[in-house]
Structures are given as structure tokens and as C-alpha cells.
Image: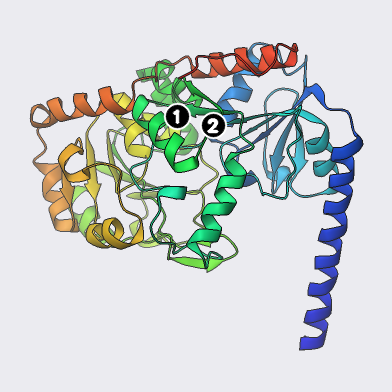
């Protein structure tokens, strides 16, 4: 294809996008806002997981999906099977903009684009997606992410976005205080825990775990390791797609644990790699972003992670955690920076090589980490008690009934 044709296609796409946004802003100016229209989105529309999923499923359980008009946004709605009566809405199509303009409630766990005009009458419940170890938003001192050339511009766009949030969820006073500052958040902070963690309380039993292993093809007779690292800001392909970065030696892990254990590998939702785990078939079981990690937590006897917020959620289960941090100095010193002394507070061994990880797992003694693990839970999981979904649905119902923007359990 010639350069001239490529430029013409790009120009046409730009024109169409501008035209659609103009229509959206017009709709947002004239359509009445309907409190009974609720829009959900998980992970930028990339999957059906996280806090929004479990809020919606609580509404289904209470029969509220038949009482309200609920829409769930997806990039590829044809690949998603939803329970209940919600309508699947394809991201960034004309109907999407119409519904967003008329909706009385938005519920999302990631930032919506800043060109999405939130109307004064619309209530935006931002659930977010994890207690932070790594520095966020306005607290960041450097920027390495794709499409972000200026730290100042990034922070300004973030500040504009958070100004549209009416509610924000937190798992603990630590998270609430950190979010207030990092997001410059001035709305209502709800100290209710995370809806996605409710099932860690309700489903933590042998019957459910057996069902989940069967659902995900995990052998019943094996011990289970879950490896769930975060993404690296500076390791990307483009267009918001990040690489799966690790130095974990899967050959060595299989040699050490292959007879008794299996290793689940869970991608972060921003990671788009399609790696070939064929050489470790029968030992490594990869799970892409479409799989809800809460279900994998329950199947896992131990967690291996790095700087990911999965550490806070998994700690609810009171099971061993190991921190494979091969790039600790670079990640902490250059890429992101931390909010607390990770090496002092981590509730499990921190290692930087596969060999050290193998040794740490093989020699792990729960009693040695009991005190640190309990202190970690008390500080970072203060609010999680299995009722977050119910609390948020109560708030949603109060908004839909016209009782304003109050509700829930404020900070």
C-alpha cells in the first residue's frame, strides 16, 4: 500500500472519530440523563473480570438486572457470555456513545478516555483495581509508558480524569490516603474493600476449589503455584499492548517441581503476548487476561509475584507468597518507585534468581512468616470482609431511586 493511500486512510479515520465525538457531545448536551441506565466496564473493555464484574453479578443475584437497564462495554462482545439481562455494548461505536450520554451511573475499574464527557447528573463509581505498592499518577517521578512523552502532561490528564470520579473504592486506610494524594481525588472514598475479593471469602472451600480446577483444566491431584507478575511500563509493542517480561527459568522450575506441582502463569490485562509454553506442557498452564484471577487465587497453594497488587488480594487467603523480583533495583529506583519499604514489609521471601526462588519454596516454613503476614493483612486488607459487592449495590440502588450521591460506607 502506498504512502499516499495510508495517509488518506488515516485522515479518514481521524475525520470519522471527530465526527462521532461531535455527535456524542451533542447527545450529552440534549439527552435526559436516566438514573435507571447503568454502564459497566472492566479493564478498558478487554475482558469480563474484576470489581465491576462482581458488582454486576451481585445485581443479577438480587434480580436488579431486570429492574434497571444495564449495559456492559467490551472490545469484542461476541466473545463474552454474560449472566443476567445486561446488554453487551461494543466499545467506541455510535450506540456506545448514545448509552454513555444517557447513563445515570458509570462503573469502571480503569480510567475512561478524557474526551468522554461526564454529565453533572451522572454518577461515576470508580472501583480501581488494586492497592498500590508502586507509585501512581501524580506521585510518579518519571514516565516510561507508551504514548507518554511528558510527565507533566500525563499528570494533568490524570488529574482531569479523576476530577470526574464521584466515588472511589479502597481496601484500607493506607490505600485511601494514597489514592487521595496520588489521584488528587476530592470525591467520596468508600472503605468497603474490593468486590472482586468477596469470593475469596465465600468460595474458599474444598468443593468450590475442586469445581474451579475442573473449570480451568487444572489437575486435581497436583499442588498449584500461581505466577502473576505485573507489567513493565517500558516493555511495549505499541497501541497499549505490553510484553510479558520475566527472567524466570521454566526449565529449572519444571525440573525442581514438575512431579508434584503445576505452575499457572497469569498475564496482566495489559499484556498481549502469545507465548509458546509447549516445552513445559503438563507443568505450565498459561492464562490470558480473559481469565478472572480471583478464580486462580482460590486454586493456588502458593503465589509467586513481583510488585503486583495481587499480593494484597491473595493475602486474604493466608497462603504462602514469594516475590521473584529479578529487576528490583531498576524497578524501584528508575521505573516506578514504591510507597512503602517493600523489603521490610513483604510477607514472604524476596528473591532475584530462579535458583533462589526454588530454594525459598523448598525450605519455606510458615511459622517464620506468620507475624509479618498478619501485620501485612492488618495494614492493607482492613476493609475486605466479603460484603463489598453488597455495599456497592446498595449504593447503586440508592442512586437509582434518586437519593442523591450519598451511600455506602464513606472513609
Q: Which residue is mark 1?
A: 212
Name which quarter of the figure residue 127 lies in: top right
Crowdedness of circle 2 by 10 Å Cα count: few (<14), some, many (20+)? some
Q: Residue at x 11, y 49 (%)?
A: 359
Quadrant where the image shows the C terminus: top left
Query: Measured from the top left, where is residue 301 in percent x and y?
Result: 27, 33
Q: Would residue 215 be seen by someone viewing this image from the given angle?
A: yes
Image-based side of 207 in relation to 46, left or right: left
Q: Would residue 258 be seen by someone viewing this image from the given angle?
A: no
Given this view, does label 1 or label 2 mark the residue nearer the observer? 2
Q: Do tag 1 and tag 2 residues touch (Cβ < 8 Å)?
A: no
Image-based side of 376 in relation to 205, left or right: left
Name which quarter of the figure residue 163 lies in: top right
Q: Is residue 119 above or below residue 35?
A: below
Q: Is residue 354 above or below residue 65?
A: below
Disc assigned to residue 186: 2
Q: Residue at x 56, y 49 (%)?
A: 158
Q: Residue at x 40, y 15 (%)?
A: 385
Amino acid at each position: 500500500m502506498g504512502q499516499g493511500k495510508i495517509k488518506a486512510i488515516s485522515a479518514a479515520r481521524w475525520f470519522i472519530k471527530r465526527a462521532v465525538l461531535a455527535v456524542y457531545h451533542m447527545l450529552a448536551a440534549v439527552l435526559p440523563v436516566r438514573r435507571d441506565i447503568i454502564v459497566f466496564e472492566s479493564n478498558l473493555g478487554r475482558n469480563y473480570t474484576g470489581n465491576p464484574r462482581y458488582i454486576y453479578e451481585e445485581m443479577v443475584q438480587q434480580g436488579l438486572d431486570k429492574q434497571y437497564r444495564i449495559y456492559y462495554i467490551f472490545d469484542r462482545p461476541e466473545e463474552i457470555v454474560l449472566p443476567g439481562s445486561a446488554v453487551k455494548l461494543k466499545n467506541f461505536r455510535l450506540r456506545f456513545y448514545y448509552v454513555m450520554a444517557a447513563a445515570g451511573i458509570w462503573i469502571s475499574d480503569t480510567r475512561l478516555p478524557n474526551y468522554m464527557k461526564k454529565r453533572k447528573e451522572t454518577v461515576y463509581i470508580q472501583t480501581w483495581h488494586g492497592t498500590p505498592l508502586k507509585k501512581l499518577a501524580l506521585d510518579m517521578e518519571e514516565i516510561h509508558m507508551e504514548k507518554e512523552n511528558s510527565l507533566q502532561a500525563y499528570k494533568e490528564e490524570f488529574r482531569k480524569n479523576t476530577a470526574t470520579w464521584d466515588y472511589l473504592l479502597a481496601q484500607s486506610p493506607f490505600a485511601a490516603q494514597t489514592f487521595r494524594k496520588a489521584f488528587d481525588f476530592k470525591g467520596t472514598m468508600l472503605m468497603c474493600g474490593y468486590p472482586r475479593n468477596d469470593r475469596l471469602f465465600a468460595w474458599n472451600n474444598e468443593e468450590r476449589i475442586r469445581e474451579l480446577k475442573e473449570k480451568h483444566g487444572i489437575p486435581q491431584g497436583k499442588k498449584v503455584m500461581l505466577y502473576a507478575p505485573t507489567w513493565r511500563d517500558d516493555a511495549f509493542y505499541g497501541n497499549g499492548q505490553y510484553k510479558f517480561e520475566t527472567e524466570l527459568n521454566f526449565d529449572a522450575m519444571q525440573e525442581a517441581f514438575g512431579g508434584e506441582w503445576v505452575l499457572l502463569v497469569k498475564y496482566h490485562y495489559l499484556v498481549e503476548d502469545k507465548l509458546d509454553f509447549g516445552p513445559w506442557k503438563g507443568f505450565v498452564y498459561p492464562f490470558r487476561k480473559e481469565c478472572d484471577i480471583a478464580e486462580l487465587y482460590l486454586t493456588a497453594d502458593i503465589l509467586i509475584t513481583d510488585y503486583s497488587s495481587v499480593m494484597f488480594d491473595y493475602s486474604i487467603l493466608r497462603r504462602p507468597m514469594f516475590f521473584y523480583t529479578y529487576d528490583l533495583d531498576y524497578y524501584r529506583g528508575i521505573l516506578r518507585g514504591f510507597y512503602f519499604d517493600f523489603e521490610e514489609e513483604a510477607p514472604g521471601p524476596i528473591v532475584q534468581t530462579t535458583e533462589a526462588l526454588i530454594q525459598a519454596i523448598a525450605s519455606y516454613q510458615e511459622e517464620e512468616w506468620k507475624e509479618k503476614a498478619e501485620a501485612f493483612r492488618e495494614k492493607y486488607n482492613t476493609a475486605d470482609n466479603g460484603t463489598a459487592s453488597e455495599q456497592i449495590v446498595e449504593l447503586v440502588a440508592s442512586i437509582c431511586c434518586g437519593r442523591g450521591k450519598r451511600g455506602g460506607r464513606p472513609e
